[in-house]
Amino acid sequence: MFIETEGTPNPATLKFLPGRDVMGVSTADFASAVTAVRSPLATDLFALQGVARVFLGGDFVTVTKNDEISWQALKPQVLGVIMDHFVAGRPVIEGDEADFNEEDVDPADREVVDQIKELLDTRVRPAVAGDGGDIVFRGFREGVVRLHMQGACSGCPSSSATLKHGIENMLKHYIPEVVGVEQVEL
């Protein structure tokens, strides 16, 4: 098994591409070992000293490290865990894969929300996935779109600029009801 790696805009995060499906159409973001209990892969990655966050994308895994370790020391360990996991045929997620996060949306805004989600899915998420992350819609109230950044995008120095200048400007251009975008944490 050959696993490719790619850098991301976040220097603390690397993207690992195992050459096979990881999560398919869904994603999973784990900010700590405690939240990763339903994922054997994420749990194994958090067992490595220096792993601070694990994001599972459609066909990739992003790992964010803390400052205590270099990528030179951590990267071979991460490659080994990912390879062992897939060679053993273990599941990436155990149990129900459903995302239980609720959206804060006024039912009267459903048509606008559908337009926002369509733009996010077609124009934003593919680019963000290319950088090892994801962006999740969390709500729309009084003209403000609430989004959550995941994976390499979470904590990335350029994510705030991307959110405000890129995504906000695009949404305002196509959807006049949008007056702003804000980042929310789960």
Image: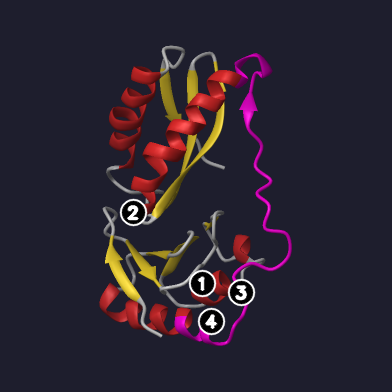
Mark 4 surroundings: few (<14), some (14-19) or many (≥20) residues within 10 A: some
x, y (%) of residue 145?
48, 25
Q: Residues within 10 Å of mark 2 (few under 14, many from 20)?
A: some
Q: Nearer the viewer, residue 20 or 131?
A: 20
**Mark 4 vs 1: CB contact within 8 A:** no
Question: At label 3, which amino acid type do we have?
Answer: Pro
- With 135 as the anchor, is 15 left or right in this view? left
Furthest residue to the right?
95
92 in relation to 101, above or below: below
Residue 166 drawn at (x, y percent): 29, 31
| Region rendered in magenta | 83-110
Front residue of 68/132: it is 132
Q: CA distance from mark 4 to mark 1?
A: 13 Å
Q: Is residue 33 left or right of residue 96?
A: left
Name which of mark 2 and mark 3 comes first in the sequence: 3
Q: Quick one: quadrant of the C terminus?
A: top right
Where residue 46 is drawn, which disc sits there?
A: 1
Pointers 1 and 2 in contact (C-beta within 8 Å): no
Q: Residues within 10 Å of mark 1 (few under 14, many from 20)?
A: many
- Which residue has dot 2 on it? 130
Which amino acid is tagged 2? Gly
Q: Position of residue 65 (x, y in %)?
A: 37, 66
Q: CA distance from mark 4 to mark 2?
A: 23 Å
Q: Amino acid at mark 4?
A: His
Residue at 56% over, 54% down: 26
Other residues around mark 3 within 10 Å, as few (<14) / some (14–19) / many (≥20): some
Q: Which mark is residue 85?
A: 4
Q: Earlier in the sequence, mark 4 or mark 1?
A: 1
Marks 3/4 in contact by CB < 8 Å: the verdict is yes
